[in-house]
Image: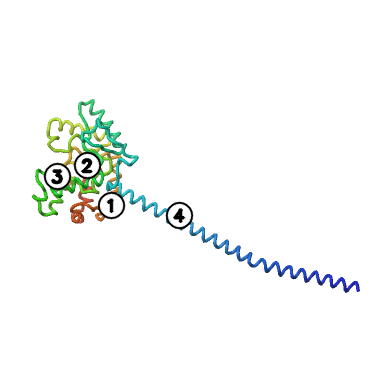
Amino acid sequence: MYLCYSFEVKKGNILNFIWLIIFLILISIPIGTSFTLYIKQRQENKILHQKLLVLELVVKKIQEKVAEKNYLMGKFDPSQRGDFIAVPENYSISGYKMYLRKETLDAFLQMQKVAEKDEVDLRIASATRNFIYQKNIWNNKWTGFTLVDGKSLVKSILDESARFKKILEYSAVPGTSRHHWGTEIDINNANLEYFETEKGKKVYEWLVKNAPLFGFCQPYIQKGVNRPTGYNEEKWHWSYLPLAKDFTQEYKNLINDADIKDFDGDKYVPDLNLINNYVLGINLECL
Protein backbone atom coordinates (compact mmCIF):
# COMPACT_ATOMS: atom_id res chain seq x y z
CA MET A 1 0.00 0.00 0.00
CA TYR A 2 2.86 2.36 0.71
CA LEU A 3 4.38 1.68 -2.67
CA CYS A 4 1.12 2.37 -4.39
CA TYR A 5 0.72 5.65 -2.57
CA SER A 6 4.29 6.66 -3.44
CA PHE A 7 3.65 5.95 -7.08
CA GLU A 8 0.48 8.00 -7.07
CA VAL A 9 2.31 10.92 -5.48
CA LYS A 10 5.11 10.71 -8.02
CA LYS A 11 2.61 10.32 -10.80
CA GLY A 12 0.84 13.48 -9.60
CA ASN A 13 4.14 15.38 -9.48
CA ILE A 14 4.92 14.37 -13.04
CA LEU A 15 1.52 15.46 -14.24
CA ASN A 16 1.88 18.78 -12.47
CA PHE A 17 5.29 19.24 -14.03
CA ILE A 18 3.92 18.45 -17.49
CA TRP A 19 1.06 20.90 -17.03
CA LEU A 20 3.57 23.50 -15.84
CA ILE A 21 5.67 23.02 -18.99
CA ILE A 22 2.58 23.29 -21.19
CA PHE A 23 1.51 26.45 -19.36
CA LEU A 24 4.92 28.02 -19.77
CA ILE A 25 4.97 27.17 -23.47
CA LEU A 26 1.53 28.64 -23.94
CA ILE A 27 2.30 31.92 -22.21
CA SER A 28 5.68 32.18 -23.95
CA ILE A 29 4.13 32.18 -27.42
CA PRO A 30 2.58 35.73 -27.27
CA ILE A 31 5.62 37.02 -25.44
CA GLY A 32 7.91 35.76 -28.20
CA THR A 33 5.61 37.09 -30.86
CA SER A 34 5.45 40.50 -29.16
CA PHE A 35 9.22 40.62 -28.84
CA THR A 36 9.64 39.77 -32.54
CA LEU A 37 7.17 42.49 -33.49
CA TYR A 38 9.00 44.93 -31.22
CA ILE A 39 12.33 44.17 -32.87
CA LYS A 40 10.77 44.49 -36.33
CA GLN A 41 9.09 47.78 -35.44
CA ARG A 42 12.33 49.14 -34.03
CA GLN A 43 14.18 48.30 -37.24
CA GLU A 44 11.46 49.92 -39.33
CA ASN A 45 11.59 53.05 -37.16
CA LYS A 46 15.36 53.19 -37.59
CA ILE A 47 15.03 52.96 -41.38
CA LEU A 48 12.31 55.62 -41.35
CA HIS A 49 14.48 57.90 -39.22
CA GLN A 50 17.37 57.50 -41.65
CA LYS A 51 15.08 58.33 -44.58
CA LEU A 52 13.84 61.44 -42.76
CA LEU A 53 17.42 62.57 -42.14
CA VAL A 54 18.22 62.16 -45.84
CA LEU A 55 15.04 64.05 -46.77
CA GLU A 56 15.90 66.87 -44.34
CA LEU A 57 19.37 67.11 -45.90
CA VAL A 58 17.90 67.28 -49.41
CA VAL A 59 15.41 69.97 -48.36
CA LYS A 60 18.20 71.93 -46.66
CA LYS A 61 20.36 71.81 -49.78
CA ILE A 62 17.43 72.93 -51.94
CA GLN A 63 16.73 75.82 -49.56
CA GLU A 64 20.40 76.82 -49.57
CA LYS A 65 20.46 76.72 -53.37
CA VAL A 66 17.33 78.87 -53.61
CA ALA A 67 18.76 81.34 -51.08
CA GLU A 68 22.04 81.52 -52.99
CA LYS A 69 20.25 82.10 -56.29
CA ASN A 70 18.13 84.82 -54.73
CA TYR A 71 21.27 86.47 -53.38
CA LEU A 72 23.07 86.38 -56.73
CA MET A 73 20.01 87.88 -58.43
CA GLY A 74 19.55 90.61 -55.84
CA LYS A 75 16.27 89.32 -54.46
CA PHE A 76 16.80 90.51 -50.90
CA ASP A 77 16.87 93.65 -48.79
CA PRO A 78 20.50 94.56 -47.93
CA SER A 79 19.35 96.56 -44.91
CA GLN A 80 18.06 93.32 -43.37
CA ARG A 81 21.23 91.28 -43.82
CA GLY A 82 23.93 91.00 -41.18
CA ASP A 83 26.73 90.79 -43.76
CA PHE A 84 25.85 94.24 -45.19
CA ILE A 85 26.54 97.62 -43.65
CA ALA A 86 25.35 101.15 -44.39
CA VAL A 87 27.79 103.44 -46.19
CA PRO A 88 28.65 106.41 -43.92
CA GLU A 89 27.12 109.63 -45.25
CA ASN A 90 30.47 111.42 -45.43
CA TYR A 91 31.67 108.89 -48.01
CA SER A 92 28.49 109.03 -50.09
CA ILE A 93 27.44 111.46 -52.79
CA SER A 94 24.15 109.79 -53.65
CA GLY A 95 21.92 111.47 -51.10
CA TYR A 96 20.20 108.22 -50.15
CA LYS A 97 20.98 105.28 -47.88
CA MET A 98 23.38 102.82 -49.47
CA TYR A 99 24.69 99.44 -48.37
CA LEU A 100 27.72 97.30 -49.13
CA ARG A 101 29.16 94.03 -47.94
CA LYS A 102 31.24 94.78 -44.85
CA GLU A 103 34.40 93.53 -46.51
CA THR A 104 33.84 95.77 -49.54
CA LEU A 105 33.26 98.88 -47.46
CA ASP A 106 36.30 98.19 -45.25
CA ALA A 107 38.50 97.83 -48.33
CA PHE A 108 37.11 101.04 -49.85
CA LEU A 109 37.69 103.02 -46.64
CA GLN A 110 41.30 101.86 -46.52
CA MET A 111 41.73 102.87 -50.15
CA GLN A 112 40.02 106.20 -49.56
CA LYS A 113 42.42 107.13 -46.77
CA VAL A 114 45.46 106.45 -48.93
CA ALA A 115 43.92 108.34 -51.86
CA GLU A 116 43.24 111.29 -49.59
CA LYS A 117 46.96 111.50 -48.75
CA ASP A 118 47.61 111.66 -52.50
CA GLU A 119 45.06 114.48 -52.78
CA VAL A 120 42.58 112.28 -54.60
CA ASP A 121 39.00 112.45 -53.38
CA LEU A 122 37.04 109.19 -53.56
CA ARG A 123 33.34 108.98 -52.80
CA ILE A 124 30.67 106.35 -53.45
CA ALA A 125 28.08 107.28 -56.07
CA SER A 126 26.30 103.92 -56.13
CA ALA A 127 26.62 100.70 -54.15
CA THR A 128 24.32 97.70 -53.72
CA ARG A 129 21.31 97.68 -56.00
CA ASN A 130 18.87 94.86 -55.39
CA PHE A 131 16.50 93.38 -57.97
CA ILE A 132 13.72 95.88 -57.32
CA TYR A 133 16.09 98.85 -57.60
CA GLN A 134 17.61 97.54 -60.85
CA LYS A 135 14.16 96.76 -62.21
CA ASN A 136 13.12 100.39 -61.72
CA ILE A 137 16.23 101.58 -63.58
CA TRP A 138 15.55 99.17 -66.44
CA ASN A 139 11.80 99.69 -66.73
CA ASN A 140 12.14 103.48 -66.62
CA LYS A 141 14.49 103.38 -69.59
CA TRP A 142 12.30 100.84 -71.39
CA THR A 143 9.16 102.96 -71.06
CA GLY A 144 10.89 106.25 -71.86
CA PHE A 145 10.47 107.70 -68.38
CA THR A 146 14.27 107.96 -68.13
CA LEU A 147 15.92 109.42 -71.22
CA VAL A 148 18.82 107.60 -72.86
CA ASP A 149 21.20 109.79 -74.84
CA GLY A 150 18.63 112.52 -74.40
CA LYS A 151 15.87 110.51 -76.04
CA SER A 152 12.82 108.53 -75.00
CA LEU A 153 13.58 105.02 -76.24
CA VAL A 154 9.92 104.10 -76.51
CA LYS A 155 9.69 106.78 -79.22
CA SER A 156 13.15 106.65 -80.79
CA ILE A 157 13.51 102.85 -80.95
CA LEU A 158 10.21 101.19 -81.82
CA ASP A 159 11.75 97.76 -82.33
CA GLU A 160 11.75 96.26 -78.82
CA SER A 161 14.66 93.92 -79.44
CA ALA A 162 16.81 96.85 -80.57
CA ARG A 163 15.63 98.86 -77.57
CA PHE A 164 16.67 96.01 -75.27
CA LYS A 165 20.19 96.02 -76.72
CA LYS A 166 20.42 99.81 -76.47
CA ILE A 167 19.67 99.77 -72.74
CA LEU A 168 22.27 97.02 -72.33
CA GLU A 169 25.01 99.41 -73.38
CA TYR A 170 25.22 100.67 -69.80
CA SER A 171 22.43 99.13 -67.73
CA ALA A 172 22.20 95.52 -66.58
CA VAL A 173 19.05 93.48 -66.82
CA PRO A 174 17.46 92.98 -63.37
CA GLY A 175 18.86 89.79 -61.88
CA THR A 176 22.15 90.01 -63.79
CA SER A 177 23.82 93.06 -62.25
CA ARG A 178 27.03 92.71 -60.26
CA HIS A 179 25.67 95.51 -58.10
CA HIS A 180 23.32 92.92 -56.57
CA TRP A 181 26.21 91.34 -54.67
CA GLY A 182 27.36 94.21 -52.46
CA THR A 183 30.83 94.00 -54.00
CA GLU A 184 30.50 96.76 -56.60
CA ILE A 185 31.11 100.49 -56.21
CA ASP A 186 30.51 103.33 -58.63
CA ILE A 187 33.13 105.91 -57.67
CA ASN A 188 32.51 109.68 -57.76
CA ASN A 189 30.37 109.88 -60.88
CA ALA A 190 28.77 107.30 -63.18
CA ASN A 191 29.31 109.49 -66.21
CA LEU A 192 31.90 109.37 -68.97
CA GLU A 193 32.10 113.15 -69.20
CA TYR A 194 33.34 113.39 -65.61
CA PHE A 195 36.27 111.08 -66.34
CA GLU A 196 37.24 113.23 -69.30
CA THR A 197 37.77 116.24 -67.05
CA GLU A 198 41.12 116.98 -65.43
CA LYS A 199 39.83 115.92 -62.02
CA GLY A 200 38.20 112.78 -63.38
CA LYS A 201 41.34 111.75 -65.24
CA LYS A 202 43.40 112.15 -62.09
CA VAL A 203 40.95 109.97 -60.15
CA TYR A 204 40.92 107.27 -62.81
CA GLU A 205 44.70 107.20 -63.20
CA TRP A 206 45.04 106.83 -59.43
CA LEU A 207 42.50 104.00 -59.37
CA VAL A 208 44.15 102.09 -62.20
CA LYS A 209 47.47 102.25 -60.36
CA ASN A 210 46.31 101.71 -56.79
CA ALA A 211 42.85 100.09 -56.61
CA PRO A 212 44.20 96.55 -57.23
CA LEU A 213 46.33 96.92 -54.09
CA PHE A 214 43.09 97.00 -52.10
CA GLY A 215 41.40 94.15 -53.97
CA PHE A 216 39.48 96.20 -56.55
CA CYS A 217 39.26 95.51 -60.26
CA GLN A 218 37.59 97.42 -63.12
CA PRO A 219 35.26 94.85 -64.74
CA TYR A 220 34.17 96.98 -67.69
CA ILE A 221 37.31 98.14 -69.41
CA GLN A 222 37.31 99.32 -73.01
CA LYS A 223 35.95 96.72 -75.40
CA GLY A 224 38.36 95.01 -77.75
CA VAL A 225 40.01 91.69 -78.50
CA ASN A 226 40.19 90.73 -74.82
CA ARG A 227 36.61 91.87 -74.11
CA PRO A 228 34.50 91.69 -77.25
CA THR A 229 31.10 91.54 -75.49
CA GLY A 230 29.36 93.12 -72.54
CA TYR A 231 28.58 96.63 -71.37
CA ASN A 232 30.47 99.67 -72.58
CA GLU A 233 33.50 100.86 -70.67
CA GLU A 234 32.74 102.15 -67.15
CA LYS A 235 35.69 103.89 -65.54
CA TRP A 236 33.64 104.48 -62.41
CA HIS A 237 32.73 100.84 -61.72
CA TRP A 238 35.08 98.90 -59.42
CA SER A 239 34.59 95.41 -58.08
CA TYR A 240 35.90 93.93 -54.82
CA LEU A 241 37.46 90.72 -56.15
CA PRO A 242 37.99 88.67 -52.96
CA LEU A 243 34.20 88.24 -52.91
CA ALA A 244 33.08 89.05 -56.47
CA LYS A 245 35.34 86.46 -58.06
CA ASP A 246 33.53 83.62 -56.27
CA PHE A 247 30.10 85.15 -56.90
CA THR A 248 30.87 85.35 -60.62
CA GLN A 249 31.60 81.63 -60.77
CA GLU A 250 28.57 80.77 -58.62
CA TYR A 251 26.38 82.81 -60.93
CA LYS A 252 27.73 80.90 -63.91
CA ASN A 253 26.97 77.57 -62.21
CA LEU A 254 23.57 78.33 -60.69
CA ILE A 255 21.69 80.81 -62.87
CA ASN A 256 20.20 80.19 -66.31
CA ASP A 257 18.07 82.15 -68.77
CA ALA A 258 14.82 80.83 -67.27
CA ASP A 259 15.68 82.57 -63.98
CA ILE A 260 16.03 85.99 -65.63
CA LYS A 261 12.50 87.38 -65.82
CA ASP A 262 9.82 89.68 -64.36
CA PHE A 263 10.77 92.99 -66.00
CA ASP A 264 9.83 94.84 -69.19
CA GLY A 265 11.07 93.08 -72.31
CA ASP A 266 12.08 89.87 -70.51
CA LYS A 267 10.85 87.80 -73.48
CA TYR A 268 14.02 88.80 -75.34
CA VAL A 269 16.35 87.26 -72.76
CA PRO A 270 16.79 83.90 -74.58
CA ASP A 271 17.96 85.70 -77.74
CA LEU A 272 20.90 87.53 -76.18
CA ASN A 273 22.92 84.98 -74.19
CA LEU A 274 23.05 87.44 -71.31
CA ILE A 275 25.07 85.30 -68.94
CA ASN A 276 27.98 84.64 -71.29
CA ASN A 277 27.93 87.96 -73.11
CA TYR A 278 27.26 90.30 -70.18
CA VAL A 279 27.61 88.71 -66.74
CA LEU A 280 30.80 86.98 -67.85
CA GLY A 281 31.73 89.57 -70.49
CA ILE A 282 34.12 91.35 -68.17
CA ASN A 283 37.79 92.23 -67.81
CA LEU A 284 39.68 88.91 -67.75
CA GLU A 285 41.62 90.11 -64.72
CA CYS A 286 38.36 90.22 -62.78
CA LEU A 287 37.44 86.60 -63.50
Residue 198 lies in what quarter of the image? top left
Of the residues under marks 4 and 1, which one precedes in the sequence? 4
Distance in Å between CA atoms under marks 2 and 1: 20 Å
242 vs 226, left or right, is right
Distance in Å between CA atoms under marks 3 and 2: 25 Å
Q: Are marks 2 and 1 in contact (CB under 8 Å)?
A: no
Residue 208 locus on image (x, y percent): 20, 35
Disc 1 target residue: 255
Q: Are marks 3 and 1 in contact (CB under 8 Å)?
A: no
Disc 4 target residue: 53
Q: Are marks 4 and 3 in contact (CB under 8 Å)?
A: no
Q: Is residue 208 visible?
A: no
* Disc 1 residue type (three-letter): Ile
Disc 3 target residue: 146
Depth check, mark 3 against mark 2: the one in front is: 3
Residue 189 locus on image (x, y percent): 17, 36
